[in-house]
Amino acid sequence: MSLGHATVAILAKELKTEFRSRELLGTTIVFVLIVLVLFSFTFDPTSSESRRFGPGLLWLAFLFAGSLMLQPSFLREQTNDTLAALRLAPIDPFSILAGKMAANFLFLLLVELILLPVFAVLYNIAIVPVLAPLVLVLALGTIGLATTGTVFSAVAAQARLRELLLPLLLLPVLAPVLIASTEATSGILRDPSDLSPVWLTFLAAFDIIFLTAAWLFGEYLLEE
């Protein structure tokens, strides 16, 4: 089976598994909504303060969403030892990672798009005029989050203290992505809007580097 067909098959499996139960998506959306509401009532920001602090709070909420959604990526395969069956299948090992990356990207992006209107209302920020560049930054940042999260989830799934190991591995690597995404979002929400191409270039380069590394070392990442 080709890399593309195998990736689509893994993606379809992940989507069916999640949308059959909807446990992970539902829990994540509720949790992050609570975080945004608590931040809003705690800081009670003005419109100008929201433009300054809102992007950081928004990406912090997305980080919480990622920490909830990325952990189970490979833990699900441990129940019936299905990861071993996938490794024995006549497919490129990277297709397993690619399918799970694509699924995690779609799940995270769905959560983010649901949260954006809530963020705009709570923090009194107009996002419709800047929606296109904002979605672009969300997509690039989310690719970085989903790619690194899936890779380190595969590594942590084989460890005993997997619940503690994933944040320890993931957060230092994600720091540059979160900083770049926050700065880019802050520029978009500024009045007047000013999106620096430096942050977009950085996010795109980060995504390409990690996707290439996952492709090169995918077989080793899935070994026990």
Image (cartoon, grey):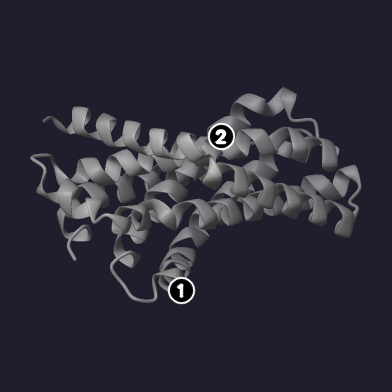
Q: Which residue is mark 2?
A: 110
Mark 1 lies on residue: 164
State the image coordinates of residue 188 (x, y, percent, origin top left): 68, 36
CA–CA distance in space, label 1 to label 2 = 26 Å
Instruction: Sort mark 2 into few (<14), some (14-19) or many (20+) by Cα contacts within 10 Å.
Output: few
Query: Who is closer to the viewer here, 1 or 76?
Result: 76
Q: Nearer the viewer, residue 101 or 19?
A: 19
Q: Secondary structure at mark 1?
A: helix
Query: Which three-letter amino acid code belongs to the residue tagged 2?
Result: Leu
Looking at the rendered image, the quarter that the C terminus falls into is bottom left
N-terminal-most mark, 1 or 2: 2
Identity of the residue drawn at 80% across and 56% down: 39
Left or right side of 45 for 219: left
Label annotation for residue 213: none
Residue in the foreground of this view, choosing between 198 and 172: 172
- Residue 165, image x, y percentages: 41, 72
> Which residue is located at x 16 percent, y 49 percent?
85
Total number of numbered discs in the rendering: 2
